[in-house]
């Protein structure tokens, strides 16, 4: 039980450290890093290399955006199995649906409920 | 100017302080790790409620995205992010923040052309290239299964 | 190839008869916080949007300057004004209520020097009896135009600068009292090959070096001829680079140099990274601090060289560099 959280912490933290290295050393912008992560997740998922990480770390592998990419790959695989080639166009959005819909709806609600704020320092 | 751009570039590089990685890397590790632990805890909680793995995973995503949206609205997410760097950028909460913050910011230009149109100004490429990569994989996967039959 | 030397304009009939500054909350917490005429507490000042808030900064600063000069809008002949926003939004919306002949200008963060220089020239030439010079910048409106939404958790690199929420306004009229505008040198567009959006100081330092050097040469002066040499917002990186460039000529500029970007904030306590920036940064420091000191005779002769990064987000995305520019204005007690 404890070990499962230790692994989630260590693997999740390590995935974030890779992102931090990209920020500090390459000056990649945030949008590029997010994109890189999702595409990497799709590739790792396609190669079947991401599932072992999820088995080990659980949330440590599914919460970072690579996990989102893996989810897209998984969705596509399942829908191709079920519907053939057209499944390639279905599975990604099917599995991404929850994340995207939640982000849209909560984004809309947040924008309605709050105002954008000013400075990030000592306000 | 009596200095070449190349020479100046080297000078500029020397004068530009590097990011203090002894601070940024541990912060990213700890905050990112904690967010993942929160995800793990939510997964277990929803699992304990009798939900299937997949449904529990979906609820976990929704919960994390909700929390991120709330913290963004309360102006806390960007403040934590100033210290956490990639620790708050890379998790799904960072994706949510990248959708929620432009919605909030560009509301002043109207609900359609502001909030609606600008919502994916940062996260758009993530979806474009994520989905495109998955479609490409789907086609390759289909061809492979074709040969295996 | 022969290089254009440009000209240094000498003025004998231009005084800055009044000046005023308005800043935001963060700036008022800085080391010079109590020198500004007005502080907009919540950074929005009751406006609906950040752009409106910036426009109000300009109108407030200009109103203060007018009242200090005992002038009314009807008796004001001309304004030069600018800011960082597309279409000079802050200036045109902030100053429309005054209904004064208006010329909008853009020189990025160097705009206040550009405005002073032009105002000085118009007054000195006798075309107008008085002329306003107003510029502003606002952290939030700049951030949302040039970078990310305010509440997005993108990280700033150590070389990044903080756009000041501030405005400065000055009224120039024929010579009557100090501070006098004595000379000015127009900057050249300097492309130093810098393309990092988060390192504007490096993009601008070359321009400051070029303009200052030409000004010294044309005036027959040296850095020691001045009490202070003030740059706009080179920040930490740009200031160091400026010293490097002058060191190659055997000049230790740091002895006379002050940078408004390094002064506006308390960099120990306020996390502004490499320093402040924006059209309002040097405008508020000049109008809030330095011009007062020249007026009182505490400073006899200063050289103010505001620096601007002529950055186009579109060009940078297309792989272009960030050219810099710097205009110098010499201001004296006598």
Image (cartoon, rainbow, N blue to C red):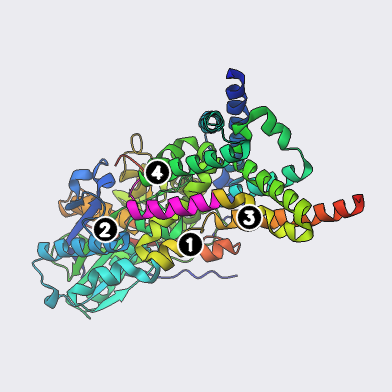
- Could one spot residue C200 in this view of the protein? no
Pointers 1 and 2 in contact (C-beta within 8 Å)? no
Quadrant of the image occupied by residue C121: bottom left
Instruction: State the CA–CA distance, disc 1 to disc 4.
Output: 34 Å
Instruction: Tell me which chain the residue with mark 2 is part of.
Output: C
**Residue at 31% over, 49% down:** C228
Between circles 3 and 2, the one closer to the viewer is: 3
The residue lying at 41 percent from left, 47 percent from top is C235
Asked if badge 4 and badge 2 are on a common chain, one would say: no
Real-space Cα separation, disc 3 to disc 4, in angstroms: 25 Å
Residue C56 visible, this angle:
yes
* Residue furthest bottom as drawn: C127
Secondary-structure class at tag 2: strand
Give the distance between the C-alpha atoms of the residues marked 4 and 2, in whole angstroms.
34 Å
Instruction: Reply yes or no: does residue A45 show up in magenta.
Output: no
Badge 4 sits on which subunit? B
Q: Are marks 3 and 1 on the same chain?
A: no
Mark 3 vs mark 1: give the one in front: 3
Pinpoint residue C220: horizontal percent, then vertical percent: 37, 60
Calculate the distance from the C-alpha at mark 3 to the C-alpha at mark 2: 48 Å
Labels 1 and 2 share a subunit: yes
Which residue is most to the left?
C70
Mark 3 falls within which chain? A
| Labels 1 and 4 share a subunit | no
What residue sits right under mark 1 in the picture? C311
Compared to residue C175, the image places residue C45 above or below, namely above
Label total for image: 4
The residue to which callout 4 is attached is B70
Which numbered disc covers residue A93? 3
């Amino acid at each position: 039980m404890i070990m499962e959280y230790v692994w989630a912490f260590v693997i999740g933290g390590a995935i974030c450290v890779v992102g931090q290295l990209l920020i500090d050393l390459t000056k990649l912008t945030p949008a590029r890093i997010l994109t890189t992560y999702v595409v990497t997740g799709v590739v790792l998922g396609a190669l079947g290399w991401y599932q072992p990480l999820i088995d080990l770390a659980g949330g440590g592998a599914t919460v970072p955006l690579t996990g989102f990419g893996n989810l897209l790959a998984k969705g596509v695989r399942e829908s191709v199995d079920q519907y053939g080639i057209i499944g390639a166009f279905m599975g990604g959005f099917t599995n991404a649906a929850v994340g995207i819909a939640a982000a849209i709806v909560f984004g809309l609600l947040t924008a309605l409920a709050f105002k954008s704020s000013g400075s990030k320092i000592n306000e | 100017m009596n200095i070449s751009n190349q020479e100046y570039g080297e000078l500029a590089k020397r004068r530009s302080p590097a990011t203090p990685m002894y601070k940024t890397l541990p912060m990213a590790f700890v905050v990112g790790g904690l967010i993942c632990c929160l995800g793990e805890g939510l997964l277990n909680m929803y699992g304990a409620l009798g939900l299937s793995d997949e449904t529990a995973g979906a609820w976990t995503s929704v919960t994390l995205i909700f929390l991120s949206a709330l913290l963004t609205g309360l102006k806390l997410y960007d403040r934590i992010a100033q210290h956490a760097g990639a620790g708050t950028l890379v998790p799904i909460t960072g994706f949510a923040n990248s959708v929620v913050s432009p919605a909030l910011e560009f509301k002043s230009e109207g609900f359609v052309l502001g909030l609606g149109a600008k919502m994916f100004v940062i996260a758009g490429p993530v979806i474009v290239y994520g989905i495109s990569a998955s479609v490409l994989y789907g086609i390759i996967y289909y061809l492979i299964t074709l040969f295996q039959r | 190839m022969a290089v254009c030397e440009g000209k240094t304009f000498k003025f004998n009939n231009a005084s800055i008869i009044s000046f005023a500054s308005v800043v935001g909350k963060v700036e008022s917490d800085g080391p010079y916080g109590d020198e500004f005429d007005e502080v907009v507490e919540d950074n929005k000042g009751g406006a609906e949007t950040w752009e409106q808030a910036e426009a109000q900064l300009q109108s407030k600063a200009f109103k203060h300057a007018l009242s200090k000069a005992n002038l009314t809008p009807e008796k004001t002949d001309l304004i030069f004004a600018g800011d960082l926003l597309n279409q000079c939004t802050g200036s045109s919306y902030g100053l429309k209520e005054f209904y004064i002949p208006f010329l909008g200008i853009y020189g990025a963060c160097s705009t206040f020097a550009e405005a002073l220089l032009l105002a000085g020239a118009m007054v000195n030439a006798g075309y107008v009896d008085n002329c306003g010079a107003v510029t502003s910048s606002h952290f939030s409106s700049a951030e949302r135009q040039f970078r990310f939404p305010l509440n997005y958790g993108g990280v700033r690199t150590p070389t990044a600068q903080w756009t000041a929420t501030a405005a400065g306004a000055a009224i120039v009229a024929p010579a009557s009292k100090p501070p006098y505008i004595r000379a000015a040198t127009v900057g050249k567009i300097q492309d130093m090959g810098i393309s990092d959006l988060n390192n504007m100081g490096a993009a601008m330092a070359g321009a400051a070096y070029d303009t200052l050097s030409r000004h010294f040469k044309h005036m027959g002066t040296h850095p020691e001829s001045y009490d202070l040499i003030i740059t706009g917002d080179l920040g930490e990186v740009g200031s160091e680079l400026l010293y490097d460039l002058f060191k190659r000529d055997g000049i230790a500029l740091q002895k006379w140099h002050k940078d408004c970007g390094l002064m506006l904030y308390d960099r120990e306590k306020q996390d502004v990274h490499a320093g402040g920036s924006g059209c309002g940064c040097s405008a508020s420091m000049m109008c809030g601090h330095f011009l007062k000191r020249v007026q009182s005779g505490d400073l006899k002769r200063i050289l103010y060289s505001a620096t601007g990064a002529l950055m186009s987000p579109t060009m940078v995305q297309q792989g272009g560099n960030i050219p810099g520019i710097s205009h110098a204005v010499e201001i004296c007690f006598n």
